Image: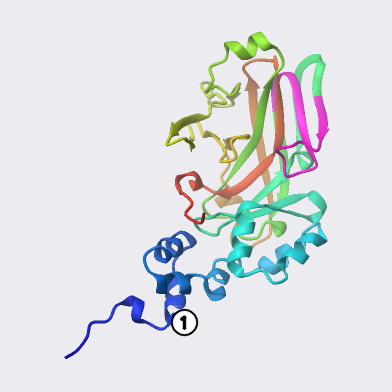
Amino acid sequence: METETGICDLPADCLALLASLTSPGDVCRLAATATALRAAADYDEVWGSFLPADCADILARCSTADDEHRREGETKKELFCRLCDCPVILDGGKLSFSLDRHSGAKKYMIPAKALWYGWSGYHYGGLVWSRCHPNSRFREVAVLSYLCWVDIDVILNTKNLSGVGRGYAAYLVYMVHWLHADTAQNQNQEDAGGWELEGSPSSSMAADTTEKNGRQKQRPTANGVGMRSDGQWIEQEINIELDKQCPEGKESNVSIEFRGFTRSHRCQIIIEGIEIRPKGMWKFKSRLN
């Protein structure tokens, strides 16, 4: 009498090969279904397939010797999870690198210090630099005060942004600090402050958030604004077609430009940087924890 066999009866190396053909999120779902699948899902071969092919070259640009020490004895799964949770600083602080939990896609952030600023506002306002911001991955953030409008620009060479191209978008990452208590009290709790973007005068720096089961969920508004998962920073999608500016396999200069009018000059706009990552990543719920 023949006995039926299922996927769990396959050798562990075969299960690992199958898992490596899926995605990080799929592997975590598979691991939750059976003990045999859970063991195969932890194989280095599986998580190594989710790391970028040039991951070692990218991490060689890391600014700290501590990162190299941490990689000693680290499994591929541990490395993947760390790169999702803890962005590494590259090229002496000129860039940060991390991975998307769901797909393993690369994410880069250009720090505020590498951006160019233009503004118009009151003579007692302007741009200053703040060191060691408690919520920033970088040493310095830009603090813009009492402004009417601001331009933020950067030109990047794609040589340092491997993998960026089709499906990627740029996001300004910032937070707002109200300078007058009466102004802050008059703001709606869901209204983060005030950009009126060029070409979209109805836009606002609003982060649409809802509470469910005691946890905050992020949802961008129609104008591309959303609260980041850390609950500290807000992001605004920048209208740029990276697909056209980053032809696959070719080195090119990418110009990223943000134009915005502030709705109130009684605030500080704190800029962490511009993040470049695949579009739509907010839709995915992490299952790695």
Say whether residue 121 is left or right of residue 207. right
What is the x, y in percent for residue 48? 58, 71
Residue at screen point 57% across, 74% down: 44
Which residue is drawn at the image coordinates 49% and 44% (left, top)?
A: 282
User: Height in image: 160 above or below 40?
Assistant: above
Question: Crowdedness of circle 1 by 10 Å Cα count: few (<14), some, many (20+)?
Answer: few
Residue 238 sits in which quadrant? top right
Up-down relation of residue 195 to residue 44 (above or below): above
Percent position of residue 211, x then y: 45, 32
Residue 38's quadrant in the figure? bottom left
Which residue extends farthest left?
A: 1
- Counting from the top left corner in percent of width and height, residue 245 is at 61, 50
Magenta segment's dominant SS is: strand
Q: Looking at this view, is 192 or 65 the one in front?
A: 65
State left or right for residue 54 relative to residue 35: right
The N terminus lies in which quarter of the figure? Answer: bottom left
Q: Is residue 131 magenta?
A: yes
Q: Which residue is mark 1?
A: 13
Magenta-drawn segment: 127-150
Percent x, y for residue 115?
76, 39
Q: Give yes or no for residue 266 being in the magenta stretch.
A: no
Check disc 1 and give the amino acid type.
Answer: Asp
Which residue appears farthest toward the bottom when viewing the image?
1
- Residue lying at the far top in this picture: please name it: 182
Q: Is residue 16 above or below residue 120?
A: below
In this orientation, which residue lies closer to the viewer: 235 or 169? 235
Count of numbered tags: 1
Q: Is residue 242 visible?
A: yes
